[in-house]
Image: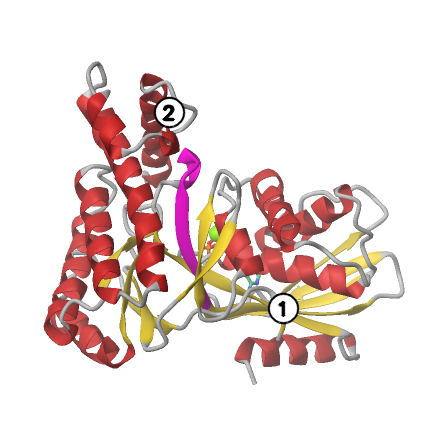
Amino acid sequence: MNDAKTRALEAYISAFNDKPDHIIRAPGRVNIIGEHTDYNDGFVLPCAIDKDTVVAIGRHEDSLIEAISCDYENQDIFSINKDINESPKLWANYVRGVAKYLQLDGYALPPSRISIAGDVPLGSGLSSSAALEMAVGRALIEQSGQKIDPTDLAMIGQKAENQFVGCSCGIMDQLISAKAQAGHAMLIDCRSLLCSPISIPKDAAILIVNSGITHSNSDGAYNERRLQCEKAALHYKVKALRDIDEAQLKAGKTGLDDVSYKRARHVVTENARTVNAAVALQDNDLYTLGQLMRQSHASMRDDFEITIPEIDQLADIMNAAIAQYCDNQGGARMTGGGFGGCVIAIAPNDTMESIIDSIHDKYRKTANQKIEILISTASAGVNYV
Ligand code: ADP
Ligand code: MG
């Protein structure tokens, strides 16, 4: 049995002396390609990983939601008849926020008891937060016997995170955690929110290496990149950089400063790479996918300037191993906002060990951070465990 499920179930029984009515899981995610394209109305290609947040839910006699967290050894309780306000406990605000926005969107909140346990690494860029939101939201919906469209659930999760927890994030994390299909990545059009499942070759695996490095100024750098992209869109007289291709980018360059031009070039080429990567995946063409991933990394390093030397080194080691052990059938790149975080590789299953050995042999950290390595398949979106 799924470990998080066991923990959530056992905690529910021992805390509430009863059995839950429903047990729901929702996955974390990793972005295969499409970085800093979301706020430019572009494309992203995430995939749900096989690490979940699990929520067990059952009824409550009073008009309350009582939640316990196995991972924080903590509990929270709030009334469903009054305005839902913030808790001093961060984890509890994801629960409260989802409850609040479900209610505001017209869904009835069931009086309920909830236990939560997860095995998505916390705060590692694999979106344990969206997994928690989707699992809690769906559990509340099941408990009250209602139905919800997964896109609506995703938007409620995003509102909870943006407006209640106070963390600005796009819609990608919630959409993939809500709508993923097993064995598939998802091409998401961040303008229309259209989601297209893209099959991942059966013999391929996903390797995620968390560098353990987080940059203190990443928020400032993120905001700066967003402004540069807006400036470039204004220069090209388009709503967002999604609206131009590489030819238009080059043709209209005059008058735009060099830095903004480089930022725009990353976004425009990354959008094209993301769409092409979806086609390559669908065609089982790991070689082309790998080329696109390497180009994406180079573009993040040289044009968008969001990588750091440790991350470049990790990506280089992984790409060199993919060249050596499987003839470039796959590739590696930094994933996430930048300045640290994770590097992802997609390559044939049977070369994973060699890639990992290479990392252990060659990666020299300048800092003391411990790397974490995870191999995953593409899992399904929120559902019963
Ligand atoms: P990431 O989404 O990359 O993992 P975030 O900082 O966005 O990082 O979200 C992590 C936060 O989400 C945690 O600090 C915690 O408040 C909440 N959270 C995630 N998973 C759980 C869980 N299993 N139990 C309780 N809270 C969780
Ligand atoms: Mg998060």
Check disc 1 and report the residue beneath it: 383
Closer to the camera in the image, 23 or 365 = 23
Q: Identify whether 9 is placed above or below 181.
A: below
Query: Which image quadrant for residue 109?
Result: bottom right
Q: In the image, residue 303 lies at what x, y percent?
A: 20, 37
- Residue 230, which numbered label? 2
Q: Which residues are magenta?
A: 38-49
Residue at 72% in and 79% down: 14
Kindly identify the residue that appears in the image at 49 percent across and 42 percent down.
170
Extreme residue toward the front, this view? 283
* Residue at disc 1, secondary structure: strand
Query: Is 215 left or right of 308, judged from the image as shown?
Result: right
Colouring of the image: secondary structure
- How far apart are the alpha carbons under marks 2 and 1? 38 Å
Q: Residues within 10 Å of mark 2 (few under 14, many from 20)?
A: many
Q: Is residue 1 left or right of residue 281?
A: right
Percent across and percent down for residue 290 are 22, 60
Q: Is residue 96 visible?
A: yes
The N terminus lies in quadrant: bottom right
Q: Looking at the image, is 139 positioned above or below residue 130?
A: below
Measured from the top left, where is residue 27 in percent x and y?
A: 52, 65
Q: In the image, is residue 358 above or below residue 163?
A: below
Across and down, in percent, residue 138 comes to 68, 61
Mark 2: which secondary structure? helix
Res. 263 in view: no
- Where residue 325 sits, quadrant-wise, is bottom left
**Magenta span contains residue 152:** no
Q: Which residue type does callout 1 highlight?
A: Asn
- Residue type highlighted by circle 2: Glu
Above or below, comparing residue 249 to residue 53 in the picture: above
**Outermost residue toward the top?**
255
